[in-house]
Image (spheres, rainbow, N blue to C red):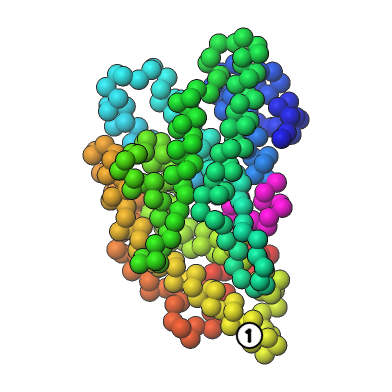
Amino acid sequence: MSSLNSPNFKSQDHSEENLEGVPTTFAEAIARLKNFVLQEFDQEIAQKQLYYHTREHINNVQRRANIIFQAIRPYWEISLKDNAAPDYMTRMQLLLDICATAHDMLQLFVPETQPHKSRRREMGVSETATIEKLFEYINILNQQQDEQNLNSLARFSDADLLIIRDAIEATICIYEPSEQAIYQPALYNSSKPLSPLAIIITLADIGALGMEGVAAYEREGSLLFLEENPDIIPILLNHKTLASENPELYENIRQRLLRRARFQISFAKSRLTRYAREIEHLPTDAIQVLTYEVFQYLNPTTIQEMDSRTPTAEDTPLEALITFFKLEHYIK
């Protein structure tokens, strides 16, 4: 674990953060934690050949989460009915920022024993490891507060830790065979309702299609494919002779891309089908704003557009799939 006073910690977007001494405000504590997260995240990117889980993904989730937060904030505040501390919403926004930044901090892949096979993650393993490492660092920050006998303003409370844990755990996805798509089961757990902050993080994490449209969604799909199939990257550079030189490998890669193309469609349809249920516990007025202003692309017209442009026919050649996913652009 990196030193709290390491010179590698640099300000990202908190102009008032205190990097030299002990944090004196909660914003400074969040900034310190955020710098730690980004340092760890950059190591993961470099060591594990990540294409999707990069700074770009962090920025996208932060941006989407903030848009959702601002959209529901007025209705969230009304629902509190003066039962919250004056700085409650400010604290929620700071916690939202760190959850968006940290939710994918560690990426743990199952060791592969066979060549030319997609690598995968076991459900919840990366998220659990992320939470554990995050909490280790938070514990150090809290200990600093205790040792200096400072007030509790910059300390992470048990309630803060619960919010962070629930939000990151809520991003865990599982595969639903009947839909041929993934979803976040925490959104469907009636015995443990999620906080608005956790709902925001889940929606932002996989909200590219609904919030940004087809192009952003397809870009994320291409980057995810490269991240899960790094073995094909050197092959793509010379794919034009692959069919004649190694037809078995040609077919292997073609089938993997074809599965990804079909998944793009089924996942999009699943997002449209599941959306209403996933936001049903938010304030009614907030739901209207989210549906018609924030998730403006999550509609049948968008799904139809995707369905018509995505190559999913069984006889689709490898070259057409590579062109559709723009893979040569992303590996340059």
Would residue 44 be found to the left or right of residue 309 on screen? right
Taking the spot 44% from the left edge, 68% from the top edge, the residue there is 263
Q: Amino acid at mark 1?
A: Glu
Mark 1 nearby-residue class (10 Å; few <14, some 14–19, many ≥20): few
Residue 26 percent across, percent down from the top left: 54, 21
Answer with the quarter of the image where residue 86 lies. Answer: top left
Residue 211 percent across, percent down from the top left: 40, 51
In which quadrant is the N terminus drawn?
top right
What is the secondary structure assignment of the residue under circle 1? Answer: helix
Taking the spot 63% from the left edge, 85% from the top edge, the residue there is 248
Camera-side residue: 49 or 137? 137
The answer, for residue 112, to whether it is visible in the render is yes
Taking the spot 60% from the left edge, 64% from the top edge, the residue there is 119
Would residue 235 be found to the left or right of residue 300 on screen? right
Answer with the quarter of the image where residue 166 lies. Answer: top left
In magenta stretch: residue 316: no
Q: Which residue is mark 1?
A: 248
Q: How many numbered tags mark residues here? A: 1
Magenta-drawn segment: 43-55
Would residue 43 be found to the left or right of residue 223 on screen? right
In which quadrant is the C terminus drawn?
bottom right
Residue 230 percent across, percent down from the top left: 65, 65
- Residue sitting farthest toward the left: 284
Answer with the quarter of the image where residue 222 lies. Answer: bottom right
Camera-side residue: 112 or 305? 112
Residue 329 percent across, percent down from the top left: 62, 66
